[in-house]
Image: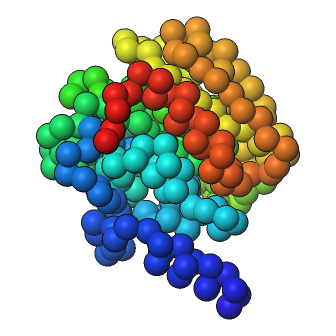
């Protein structure tokens, strides 16, 4: 435990100072106010805004992939309410991104990135983003992402995942976003296809392969440019190497950020 604590502290010491550090607030940085690009990160279920600063612990943090791929870009680790996401309510997310984006008038492109349920949130949010935000999004990088949440509620071995999803499914009244939509179904209405890079884990039992086996094909059917990287691990935060490959894939048309 002492070694783990020292590793976490070390990661914090080598990163740029976050824009906000209070719990429940977005964490971010922008080395240059002239940034042309923003990366928006959505944390995993049960995670928090500090997640990309300390995960993965081995070698480097998620945010290091952002700094390598997009030198001089702005970065925002977003706080969000999973229950609102499951209801299809993305207003708070959109308003937070708009407020942050307006601090950088030169921004002409945005990448979304998310881990696990954060990946689901990133994909679902893209279809509901305001025209101002959606027009800037050039792609989405996700890892360990579920597509069919109803199937996930039955097949995941993660108790927190099962409890949250089954609680939402059991609610009475009008159907929730969860009850009648998967990512594949949500993207049926998308008018602006985008680039999507998916990282999946072959040994994943938290988000089993059956929960996303058709995601790549269905996104391609909606006109999205999709690439998938399969790694021989269980549910985890992937090496930043794969994240860097993902950012490279989605940003082929991104302008120079310096």
Residue at 27%, 38% (x, y): give it.
Answer: 36
In the displayed structure, 52 sits above or below 113; it is: below
Q: Position of residue 210 (x, y in %)?
A: 78, 32
Report the quarter where the C terminus lies.
top left
Q: Position of residue 153 (x, y in %)?
A: 68, 44
Left or right: residue 179 compared with residue 145: left
In the displayed structure, 197 sits above or below 162; it is: above
Q: Position of residue 84 (x, y in %)?
A: 39, 47
Residue at 74%, 26% (x, y): give it.
Answer: 213
In the displayed structure, 103 sits above or below 128; it is: below
Left or right: residue 131 compared with residue 186: left
- The number of callouts visible is 0
Residue nearer the viewer, 24 or 76: 76
Q: Is residue 207 visible?
A: yes
Q: Position of residue 57 (x, y in %)?
A: 65, 68
Q: Would you identify the image quadrant in which residue 37 lies?
A: top left
């Amino acid at each position: 435990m002492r070694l783990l604590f020292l590793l976490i502290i070390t990661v914090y010491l080598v990163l740029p100072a976050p824009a906000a550090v209070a719990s429940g607030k977005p964490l971010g940085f922008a080395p240059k106010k002239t940034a042309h690009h923003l990366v928006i990160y959505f944390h995993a279920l049960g995670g928090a805004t500090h997640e990309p600063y300390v995960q993965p612990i081995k070698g480097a943090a998620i945010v290091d992939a952002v700094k390598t791929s997009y030198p001089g870009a702005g970065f925002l680790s977003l706080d969000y309410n999973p229950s609102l996401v499951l209801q299809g309510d993305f207003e708070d997310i959109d308003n937070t991104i708009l407020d942050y984006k307006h601090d950088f008038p030169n921004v002409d492109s945005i990448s979304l990135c998310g881990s696990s349920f954060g990946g689901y949130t990133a994909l679902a949010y893209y279809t509901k983003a305001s025209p101002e935000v959606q027009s800037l999004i050039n792609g989405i990088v996700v890892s360990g992402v579920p597509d069919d949440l109803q199937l996930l509620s039955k097949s995941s071995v993660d108790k927190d995942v099962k409890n949250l999803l089954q609680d939402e499914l059991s609610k009475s009244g009008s159907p929730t976003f969860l009850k009648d939509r998967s990512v594949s179904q949500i993207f049926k209405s998308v008018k602006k296809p985008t680039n999507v890079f998916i990282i999946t884990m072959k040994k994943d039992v938290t988000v089993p392969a059956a929960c996303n086996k058709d995601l790549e094909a269905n996104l391609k059917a909606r006109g999205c440019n999709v690439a998938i990287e399969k790694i021989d691990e269980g549910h985890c935060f992937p090496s930043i190497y794969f994240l860097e490959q993902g950012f490279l894939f989605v940003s082929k048309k991104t302008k120079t950020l310096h």
